[in-house]
């Protein structure tokens, strides 16, 4: 918790002030959580989170047009990820993955918002004061949009071009080579026809944000990815297992088809005709 608060101070997320008359402070709380990989195992770089916590704002108490205005933020869709991987497989370059640490804390918010002091860490000298938020906190309605605008501006300022159709795709061309970057909130995948461009992109991101380089892409948005010399293969084994476990089908006998192939299907002459328009 102390490290999280220290990160807030370093990023200048908030300022301790008196609550202005007519304003209200939004509550905060600590959240504990472990992050797991595609096999359901706590990932190595997140394993220490079991002794850490994340401070989040109680955004459900925010009021529209008072605490926030616009909240929409584009995120990559599964179709876009599949196209990205298909293009990478066709061209023949490796796809890598990066993760932004505490991404929302980098997003600058435009509204005047105040939050209560973190539970258990109230300033003994100023117990009645509140924090005026400068950058977004997790839990704020406008946090995803603020982070996206911050990241997009940084990439555009560094000569990237934003996709005209897919606003989460950023492209950079240099001497016949191309670098592709796909963004899903704080998860970023990228690849290039020139490995040196990937190295420069990693450095570029580390210069601005605290990043975790996760190496070659192997799991993203529920897709398990295997990159081989003969192509890129994707599957959703983990998703299927979770569905089977959810509905209690992990111990049932498997069958190539769920229907009895020996039983003939007969027309129900007494039944009502099916409206074919419902199934078009």
Image (cartoon, rainbow, N blue to C red):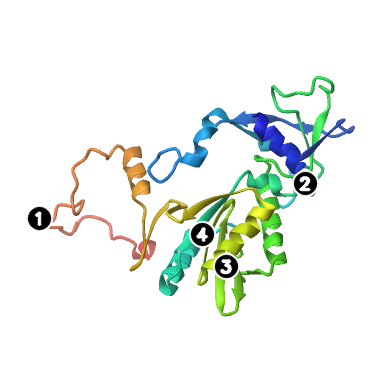
Instruction: State the residue lying farthest toward the bottom.
Output: 176
Distance of label 4 from label 1 (alpha carbons): 41 Å
Residue 122 at x, y percent in the picture? 75, 23
Judging from the image, what secondary structure is the residue with disc 3 in? Answer: helix
- In the rendered image, residue 166, in percent from the top left (x then y), is placed at 58, 66
Q: Can you tell which of label 4 and label 2 is closer to the viewer?
A: 4
N-term-proximal mark, 4 vs 1? 4
- Tell which tag, 3 or 1, sits nearer the viewer: 3
**Residue 206 location, x and y as percent?**
64, 53
Q: Is residue 246 left or right of residue 79?
A: left
Q: Is residue 122 visible?
A: yes
Pair 4/1: label in front: 4
Which residue does the numbered mark 1 point to in the structure image? Answer: 262
List the residue tagged with mark 2: 65
Q: Can residue 73 be seen in this snapshot?
A: no
Using the image, determine if residue 234 lies above or below residue 195.
above
The image quadrant where one finds the N terminus is top right
Distance of mark 3 from mark 1, alpha carbons? 59 Å
Sequence-first tag of 2 and 1:
2
Identify residue for label 3. Answer: 197
Say which quadrant the C terminus sits in: bottom left
Q: Nearer the viewer, residue 6 or 121?
A: 6
Q: CA distance from mark 3 to mark 2?
A: 42 Å
The numbered disc on residue 77 is 4
């Amino acid at each position: 918790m102390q490290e999280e608060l220290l990160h807030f101070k370093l990023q200048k997320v908030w300022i301790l002030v008196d609550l202005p008359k007519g304003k209200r402070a939004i509550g905060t709380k600590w959240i504990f959580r472990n992050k797991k990989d595609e096999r359901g195992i706590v990932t190595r770089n997140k394993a220490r989170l079991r002794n850490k916590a994340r401070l989040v704002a109680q955004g459900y108490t925010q009021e529209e047009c008072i605490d926030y205005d616009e909240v929409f933020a584009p995120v990559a869709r599964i179709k876009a990820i599949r196209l990205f991987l298909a293009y990478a497989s066709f061209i023949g370059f490796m796809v890598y993955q990066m993760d932004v640490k505490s991404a929302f804390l980098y997003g600058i918010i435009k509204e005047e918002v105040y939050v209560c002091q973190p539970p258990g860490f109230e300033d003994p000298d100023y117990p009645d004061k509140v924090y005026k938020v400068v950058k977004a906190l997790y839990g704020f309605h406008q946090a995803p949009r603020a982070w996206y605008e911050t990241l997009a501006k940084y990439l555009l300022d560094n000569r990237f071009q934003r996709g005209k159709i897919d606003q989460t795709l950023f492209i950079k061309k240099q001497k016949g080579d191309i670098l592709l970057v796909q963004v899903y909130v704080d998860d970023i995948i990228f690849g290039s026809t020139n490995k040196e461009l990937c190295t420069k992109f990693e450095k570029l991101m580390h210069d601005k944000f605290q990043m975790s380089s996760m190496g070659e892409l192997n799991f993203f948005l529920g897709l398990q990815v295997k990159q081989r010399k003969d192509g890129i293969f994707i599957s959703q084994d983990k998703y299927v297992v979770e569905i089977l476990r959810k509905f209690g089908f992990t111990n049932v006998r498997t069958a190539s088809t769920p229907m009895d192939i020996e039983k003939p299907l007969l027309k129900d002459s007494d039944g009502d005709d099916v409206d074919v328009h419902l199934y078009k």
